[in-house]
Image: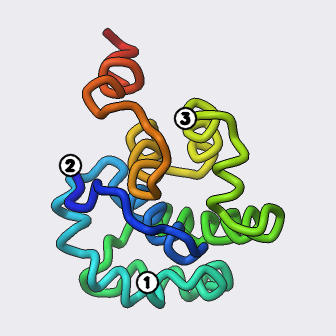
Amino acid sequence: MPADLTARNIRTVDQYLEVVARAIFASGLAWEVVDRSWPETRAAFARFAAVKVAALSDRDLSHLSATPGVIGNTAKIEAVRSAAGFLMDKKHEYGSVGRWLGSLVGFEQQQRALRELRFIGPFGAYYVLSVAGFDVPEYAKWQEAYSPAARTG
C-alpha cells in the first residue's frame, strides 16, 4: 500500500503526472520499492514538469533507465512520457486535468478513462482518483467489487 493514499490538493498537470507516474512505476512492484526510489525518480524526471517529460527523447529515456535510484523499466519510463502528453492534451482540451476527470460521470467512467494509460490497472486508477480527492468507493468495498481478485473469484 502506498504511503500517500490520502487526498491532497492536486490541481496542476504536473501534480497529476507525478501521481500517475507513481501508479505506473508501482505496477507489479511493491509500493515500498517505489517509495524508496521516489526522491531520485522525482529529480530525474524534473519534478514531473509535464512539458519537460513529454518532450523527452528516446535517448533521454535510455539515460533515465540507467540513472541510479530510478526504477529502470524502459517500458514504464516510456509510459510516463506518454502519460505526460495525454494529460497535457486533457488540460488543453478541458482547462485542467481535474475538469476532465470531473466531466466524467462517476468513479466507473473516471477509472475507465485512466486505465487507458499504460500500466494503470484497477488499483492505479483508484490510487490516482483517491489521492486527487475524487469520490471513490471505500477501499474495502472497492476491493470486493473492483480488484482483480474479485473478478477471478
Side of 18 relative to 11 (left or right): left
How far from the left and from the top, in percent, is residue 91? 73, 68
- Decide: marks 1, 3 in contact (CB < 8 A)? no
Circle 2 or circle 3, nearest the eye: 3
Query: Is disc 3 surrounded by few (<14), some (14 to 19) or many (20+) residues within 10 Å?
Result: some
Question: Which numbered mark, 1 or 2, is in the foreground of this view?
Answer: 2
Left or right: 19 as drawn, with respect to 114? left
Q: Earlier in the sequence, mark 1 or mark 3?
A: 1
Q: Secondary structure at mark 1?
A: helix
In the rendered image, the quadrant that contains the C terminus is top left
Q: Is 121 placed above or below 21 here?
A: above
Element marked by disc 3: helix
* Real-space CA distance between mark 2 and mark 3, rounded to the nearest whole angstrom: 20 Å
- The residue that label 1 is drawn on is 64
Q: Amino acid at mark 1?
A: Leu
Q: CA distance from mark 1 to mark 3?
A: 33 Å
From this view, report whether residue 96 is shown above or below residue 99: below
Which comes sooner in the sequence, label 2 or label 3? 2
Report if the CB atoms under discs 2 and 3 are less than 8 Å apart. no
The residue labelled by disc 3 is 107
> Tag 2: residue type?
Met
Specify which label sits upstream in the sequence, 1 or 2: 2
